[in-house]
Image: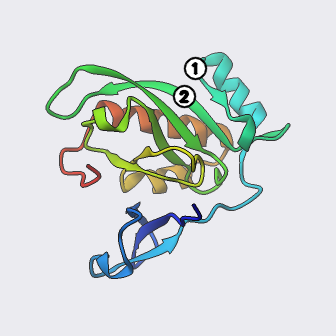
Amino acid sequence: MNEKKYGIYDDQGDFLRMSAGVEQINDCKPGEYKVPLRVCSGSSLSKAVFNRFKMTMYPSLNFSSKHSTKNTIGAFVVNLQGVVSSRDQSVVNYQLLIDSRSFAETPQVFVLSPKCENIEHENIFRKGRYSILPEMEICGLCTGSDFKDGFIRCRTEKEKLGFLLHHVEDVLKNPNPLDEAR
């Protein structure tokens, strides 16, 4: 299957959401447009920064050897706790896949577990196929409109990784019932 994945962007070029594979160009709302998602090469997370976080704060961090090199991490998995939804504050363990191939920009976050069918969290998109793991249907995580600005303001890789992990954990623990992801 040679399927392209698209993202929906607003007039200023800011990412709004992933588009479903069945959506057509005319399915976008006024002021939105659809473009294929692209990854900038050479902007991955450094292995040294990744290893510092694994040793000190996030022991569940594991990198994907398929997307990584000797010195860079192109994708990694982390376990973080969150809640079921805004209506159910029961604690859930989420296993996340983070696409850090475009770490200089804003990484995309995906949920590996629980299974998509069992997710009720308002900030988690319905399942789809993505270039990072095309053989599986996984759910994307909506990180919110303020994420990109905060991430870009971070000056070092260490600050960016810390901001990313803290922000994702915050989103998982504090669902936005007004989010249209689900």
Q: How many marks?
A: 2
Report the Cα–Cα distance between label 1 and label 2: 5 Å
The amino acid sitting under disc 2 is Val
For this rendering, which residue is in front, 41 or 13? 41
| Rendered view: 117 above or below 24 | above
State the SS at label 2.
strand
User: Which residue does the numbered mark 1 point to in the structure image?
Assistant: 60
Give the percent coordinates (x, y) of residue 107: 56, 50
Residue 42 horizontal side relative to residue 25, left or right: right
For this rendering, which residue is in front, 145 or 182? 182
State the SS at label 1.
loop
Residue 150 horizontal side relative to residue 91, left or right: right
Residue at x 69% of width, y 44% of height: 74
User: Which residue does the numbered mark 2 point to in the structure image?
Assistant: 78
| Rendered view: 100 above or below 4 | above
Give the percent coordinates (x, y) of residue 112: 47, 34
| First along the sequence among labels 1 and 2 | 1
Residue 101 horizontal side relative to residue 119, left or right: right
The amino acid sitting under disc 1 is Ser
**Colour scheme employed for the rendering of this structure:** rainbow
Q: Looking at the image, can residue 73 be seen?
A: no
Q: In the rendered structure, are the residues bearing label 1 and label 2 in contact, judged by CB atoms less than 8 Å apart?
A: yes
Residue at x 76% of width, y 34% of height: 47
Q: Which mark is residue 14?
A: none
Q: Can you tell which quarter of the image residue 162 is in?
A: top right
Crowd tier of the residue under label 1, counting other residues whose Cα lies within 10 Å: few below 14, some 14–19, many 20 or above: some
Residue at x 30% of width, y 37% of height: 117
Give the percent coordinates (x, y) of residue 92: 33, 22
* Image quarter (top left, top right, bottom left or bottom right) of the N terminus: bottom right
